[in-house]
Amino acid sequence: MQNNLSIYNSLTRTIEPFNPLHPPFVGLYVCGPTVYSDAHLGHARPAVTFDILYRYLLHLGYRVRYVRNITDVGHLENDADEGEDKIEKKARLEHLEPMEVVQKYLNTFLKNMEQLNALPPSIEPRASGHIIEQIELVKKILEKGFAYEVNGSVYFDIVKYSQKFHYGKLSGRVLEDLQENTRIIGGKDEKRNPFDFALWKKATPEHIMRWPSPWGEGFPGWHLECSAMSTKYLGEVFDIHGGGIDLQFPHHECEIAQSAAALGNESVRYWMHNNMITINGQKMARSLGNFITLGQLFSGNHPLLHQAYSPMTIRFFLLQAHYRSTVDFSNEALIAAEKGLKKLLKASVTLKNLKPSKESSIDIVSLKARCYEAMNDDLNTPLLLSHLFEAVKLINSAADGSSGMTADEIKETGDLFNTFVFDILGLTDESENKSDEKLTSELMKIIMDLRLEARNKKEWAVSDHIRAELKKAGIMLNDTKDGVTWERD
Ligand code: ZN
C-alpha cells in the first residue's frame, strides 16, 4: 500500500485556490538522471509526467520554478554506499575524464528531452557544482546530533533520527524490517547500523572525484544533493517533489530524513511518483537484453523493435496510461499509439477545413469542463484523451456530412485542441517537420538546376560560387558521372 503522502491527489485539492491577481508560486523539484549512459525508456516516463504537470500548472496561471537536478557525482553502483561511482566506472571504461562522461550523456539526454517536447526546467543544478552546500548540510546534521563521523566518512544515524521523527513514512518501511533485511557488504562496515546511509564518503586513493572537507578528502553521498539543492533553490519548504517510484526508497526517504534532521521540519508538501515501464511484460535490464535507449527507439535500431517510433508516438503512448500505473512497451502497443496519435492530429487538420453548418452537434461547454476535470483528477491523461477522441468522432462525422458543426463550435473545438492537445499534452505534428525536409529537397533541386545551367553556359565563377555558399550552409555537393547529389556536411 502506498502511503497517503506519496499520492498527489488532485491539483485543486492540494494547492490553494487560484487568484489571478496574486498567482501563487509553485516550487517543483524532480530527481533528474545520473548521466553515465544514454537516456533510455525509463527516463522518458518522468520526463513526460512532470512535463505535463509543469505545463498544466503554467496553463492554470501559476508561477512555477521547476528544478531538475543532474547527478554527476556520488551515485555508487547498486544505489549502495559501497562500490564504484557509476560515472567514474564509465570514465575508466571509455578512457574519459568523469566530466567528459557527464557532458557526453547529458548532451544526449537534453537532446532526447527536446525531441520528446519536454519543456526545459527553470534550473538544472549539478551535484558537483554544489559541494559547498552539501558540506554545510552535513555539518548541520552533525550539529543536530543525527549523524556521526567514522574514519573520514559521515553517516546518518537512523536510530537516533527515529526517536524524534518517522523514518519510513513515505515508503511504509518499518525500522525493524530494515534491520533484518539490510546486508552488511564486505564485512568492513563502519556504520553503527547497516541501514544508516552515507552523507559524506572518504575517497579511497584511486577515487578521482574528490573534494576537501572538514572530514578529509571525499565526496557527497547520493541522497544529499537533492536535499541541498532543493533547499537552495526552492526554500526550506516547497510544494511538489517528483521522481520515479524506484526512487521512493531509499533515495526520497533519505531526503526527507536529511532535511528534517537539518531543518527540524520536513521540506516537501507533496510527493509525486511515476510508475515503471516494463518491456513485453519484463523489467527493463541490460542483463535481459531488453534495454532500449531513446535514440534506438527513435531510429528503430534495436533487435526488439519492428520499426522506428517517433518521439511523439512515445509521448502519446505514455499519456495513454495514468502516470501511477505501470506501462508495458510492445511493438503492438506502440503501433496502436502511432495510429491513435495520427487520428487525433488528422482531426485537428480536418477541423480547420470544415465548412460551418447550421446544425449543432457538440456540447463544447460540457466537453471542456470534463477535460479540466480529468486533468484536475491527479492528471488523468487517459481520461482526457478519451474526451478528446469524442471530439474527433464529432469532427469526422461533420466532415463526412452525417452531422454538422456551427462556426462557433468549430472555433471553440479548435481552441480546445490548442489548449489540451498542443499546450497541455505537449503533442506536436511531426509531419510538419517532414514537410520542412520536403521543402529543403525541392529548394535543393532548384539550386542544383541553376548551377547546372551555369555550368552548361561555362559560367564557372557562378557554379563555384553556388558550391562554396552551399558549403558554408553545411551542404556538400557531389559531382558524379550520373549527375549531382547533395548531402548535409
Ligand atoms: Zn534526488
Image: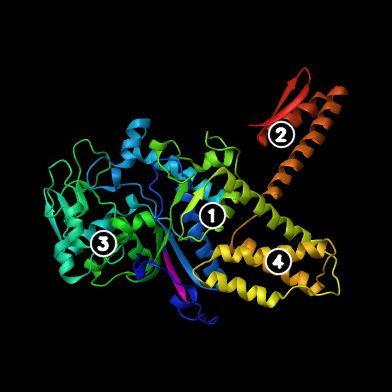
What kind of residue is marked 2? Glu
* Label 4 sits on residue: 391
* Label 3 sits on residue: 173
Q: Indicate the quadrant of ligand 1 in the picture.
A: bottom left
Mark 2 and mark 1 in contact (Cβ < 8 Å)? Answer: no
The quadrant of the picture occupied by the C terminus is top right
Q: Position of residue 229 (x, y in %)?
A: 34, 60
Mark 1 to mark 2 CA distance (whole Å): 44 Å
Q: Is the residue marked by circle 4 packed among few (<14), some (14-19), or many (20+) residues within 10 Å? A: many
Mark nearer the viewer, 1 or 2:
1
Q: Is residue 455 above or below residue 380?
A: above
Mark 3 to mark 4 CA distance (whole Å): 45 Å
Q: Secondary structure at mark 3?
A: loop
Q: Nearer the viewer, residue 32 or 65?
A: 32
* Label 2 sits on residue: 469
Q: Secondary structure at mark 1?
A: helix
Name which residue lies at 66% across and 65% down.
388
